[in-house]
Amino acid sequence: MTEIRDRQTKVTSSHWGAFEVDVENGRIVATRPFSADPAPTPIPDILPAAVHHRTRIDRPSIRRGWLAAREKNGRGSDDFVKLPWDEALDIAAAELDRVRKTYGNEAIFGGSYGWSSAGRFHHAQSQAHRFLNSIGGYVASFGSYSTGCAQAIMPHVFGEPFLKLIYEHQDSWQTIHDHTETLVMFGGINPKNSQVSMGGITEHRTAGWFDRFAEKGMRCVNIGPQRGDAPANCEWIALRPASDTALMLALAHVIESESFTDREFLARCTTGFDRFLPYLMGQEDGQPKTPEWAGPLCGVEPETIRELARRMATTRTLITVAWSLQRAEHGEQPYWMSAVLAAMLGQIGMPGCGVGYGYGAIGGVGKSFLGLHGMTFSQGQNPVKKVIPVARIGDMLRNPNQLYDFNGKREPYPDIRLIYWAGGNPFHHHQDLNGLHKAWQKPETIIVHEPWWTATAKRADIVFPATTPYEREDIGRSNLDDYLFYMPQMIAPVGEARDDYDIFGGLAERLGAAQAFTEGRGSSEWIRLLYQEYRAIAADMDVEIPDLEALKERNWIHLPIETQGPNQTLFKPFREDPEGAPLKTPSGRIEIFSETIASFGYPDCPGHPVWLPPGEWLGNATESAPLHLVSPQPGDKLHSQLECALADVEGARPVGIAIHPDDARARDIGSGDLVRVFNSRGACRARAAISEDIRQGVVAMPTGAWFGDPGDNIDPNGNPNALTLDVGTSRLGQGSSAHTALVEVARLAE
Ligand SMILES: Nc1nc2c(c(=O)[nH]1)N[C@H]1C(S)=C(S)[C@@H](COP(=O)(O)OP(=O)(O)OC[C@H]3O[C@@H](n4cnc5c(=O)[nH]c(N)nc54)[C@H](O)[C@@H]3O)O[C@H]1N2
Ligand SMILES: Nc1nc2c(c(=O)[nH]1)N[C@H]1C(S)=C(S)[C@@H](COP(=O)(O)OP(=O)(O)OC[C@H]3O[C@@H](n4cnc5c(=O)[nH]c(N)nc54)[C@H](O)[C@@H]3O)O[C@H]1N2
Ligand SMILES: [Mo]
């Protein structure tokens, strides 16, 4: 370890951006904004308190009931026995060995989903995968909670992996600024969310773009349940959650009825409009999808829909869709339908027009940089071929060996005996946490690495204390950012925490896999090697990067990789020459009707987009659960990270629940009142935040509060996943349906 001076200030990078860190006598005492960031986020303010918080895990800990008798009950309620590292590693290694020998590596779940920390080398999930591969493999997971459903459906429509589409090809903010006349944002574009980006975002510029759009006179329309999902200078159409597909169909109906459909574009660049049109016009099911039909479903006036459709058809229009829309039951439909609507307008492939996904969702979307990739620590090969859709973990644990459908395949769920998690917090992120807690009792052993005693760590059997980025050195770099950081170690590990790499190294050694996992290198040697490789890749692209010693000295550099390349208009080459530059779909065109999807025979995702109401929404609200709960990302942090210290702030917990004045009045709820939010799946506490900026009938609670203990009959801090529905989006996408939940709210006595 490098010597730590008494007082120093260094810059580091994180998922929420770069910031300066002041260290005094071995403790982080303050953070300050990074000089090059035009709109720094306040997220790091709480970091000093969090890094040294009392909830840090100080030593390896094994749950008493498991240690004594491999007792499974008691997860989340037992206390822990603290052990020396060697002893705890011996026990964990022996258990991994027992499970792989008794049941095979197909009994180990190592999806280990989660954002963990930025930093290229010490990425906990990659480390976990590499380690598990080195000992024979693990059951992996596909996709993310962010975009799992889109990752399944959109390749059928556009023939591209969804992430490649949004990160490499979509129009840049500059292109939108220069060309778009009407920006129609389903689910808004919220600068609050672009505070963060996987692996880092240095210059926060999203809000600034909207000021420039307004100056230009661009019309920006936010369609969704909350006004605050877009900057204040945007129009708001207050939509019922989950009804977007109905609205899009009605827009399409107007476009078709008023002869705006671009038949020439449809003929050249798409397939299957003829199969979709009878559904749209009602010849198929007797129900034309008119604005009068959609109005009551969406809670939007038919005239508003007509006016918007005409505007979209007569101006250069970009339709954007937030990721949240596909994080709901039948989330495939608005994604597919938005593509069909854009195709009917015939503007796909023109700069600033067509359709785009996830602008603002994270800060990197809409930035355009040279594809300078690299510095990836190899995860090795996984000999186990079983993969589950990431959000189906509860189903997997509940239904071992049962068949399930996913994107055209039917497979049995594995029979999991051991769960290994490093760098994620499933007892924050998964839906219906009370249901997950029950399913979580099935495996024989659960091993977790965590810096903090999260709800997941508390529900594990073996817990290893992990360092935070401030306790180890790393390199900060993201494909979606034009800065490069040396992230220095700033303080000694808190308690007995170790780097994930060293924990896995210790286990690998005990399991005879040391060479496969470490290849004889320590972390600093790996960092040096990966950096050298990255420098060589950069040099090939004529980007000069200093050597590691110089980067250490400079702490950070700006990379000259911003571009406005030809790729910055989505599908431009395809539009210009659909025969010569076909899409990678079966037809080579945009698939309005997909023979592939139709061949799956899924009633919940047929061959073209359709309106399918979800299991819970305002259209089937009940007396006991009359309100639609949406649970967006928190504005003041990243997910459940740094929560321990934020929760200490006077009055900060439970979290606020946005509720319309009429709904509050009907329940005799006043502003700031403590409330109980509940349904048949669970209950949590929240504090009423009465607001005209949320649609009547809808309530919104941010994610991120630490979930309580199993004995709690009400979640104390307000994690909305005490209430959400744990079902796949459909047999096709099997994504998370986090935004699907009906609830009731009642005042609680203080
Ligand atoms: N209701 C509802 N639920 C949702 C969503 C929603 O919209 N609504 N959104 C979903 C989405 S999109 C996402 S991405 C997920 C996010 O869910 P997660 O990614 O699981 O959330 P995080 O809080 O970022 O979890 C990261 C964990 O890693 C730990 N950690 C940080 N650094 C390290 C490290 O170096 N080593 C180790 N071992 N651990 C580390 C942190 O302390 C934290 O506990 O939530 C999902 N859940
Ligand atoms: N500050 C901060 N930023 C973050 C994160 C964080 O934890 N903190 N997490 C990051 C991650 S992992 C992700 S995946 C992205 C997520 O990015 P998104 O998925 O875009 O964001 P959300 O905040 O989940 O939802 C955005 C809005 O969608 C609206 N909405 C919900 N349901 C519907 C619907 O049916 N129709 C319409 N039209 N609107 C609806 C809600 O009002 C909500 O406020 O955010 C990223 N950004
Ligand atoms: Mo996410």
Image (cartoon, rainbow, N blue to C red):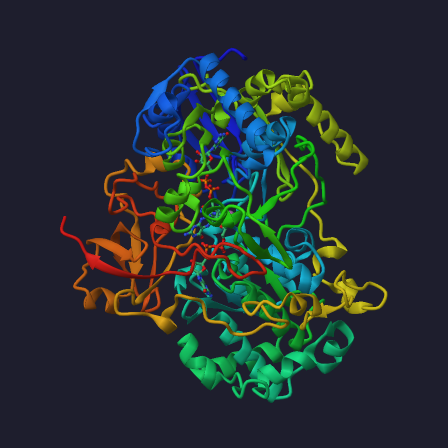
Residue 422 placed where, x, y %? 50, 32
Query: Is 720 in front, or is 255?
Result: 720
Q: Taking the image as drawn, is residue 109 in sight? A: no
| Depth check, front residue: 729 or 43 | 729
39 in relation to 558, above or below: below
Q: Residue shown at 49%/22% (left/top)? A: 92
Q: Residue furthest right?
A: 580
Left or right, residue 372 beside residue 285: right
Q: Nearer the viewer, residue 580 or 537?
A: 580
Task: Tell which of 695 and 88 is nearer to you.
Answer: 88
Q: Quadrant of the N terminus?
A: top right
On the picture, is 389 further left or further right than 349? left
Above or below for 256 versus 589: below
**Residue found 67% across the figure and 65% down from its top:** 157
Q: At which x and y percent is residue 625?
A: 29, 64
- Most extreme residue toward the front is 102
**Image coordinates for residue 52, horizontal then vertical, percent:** 37, 24
Q: Is residue 282 above or below residue 451?
A: below
Asked if one can make out residue 171 in the rendered structure from this viewpoint, the answer is: yes
Q: Quadrant of residue 747?
A: bottom left
Left or right: residue 559 versus residue 722 is: right
For residue 436, what is the image quadrant? top left
Horizontal and vertical percent position of residue 701: 34, 54
741 with respect to 577 (left or right): left
Name the image quarter holding residue 126: top right
- Residue found 50% across the figure and 59% down from its top: 189
Task: Note whether 44 is above or below 495 in the view shown.
Answer: below
Point out the residue furthest to the left here.
749
Could you tell me how many numbered marks the image carries?
A: 0
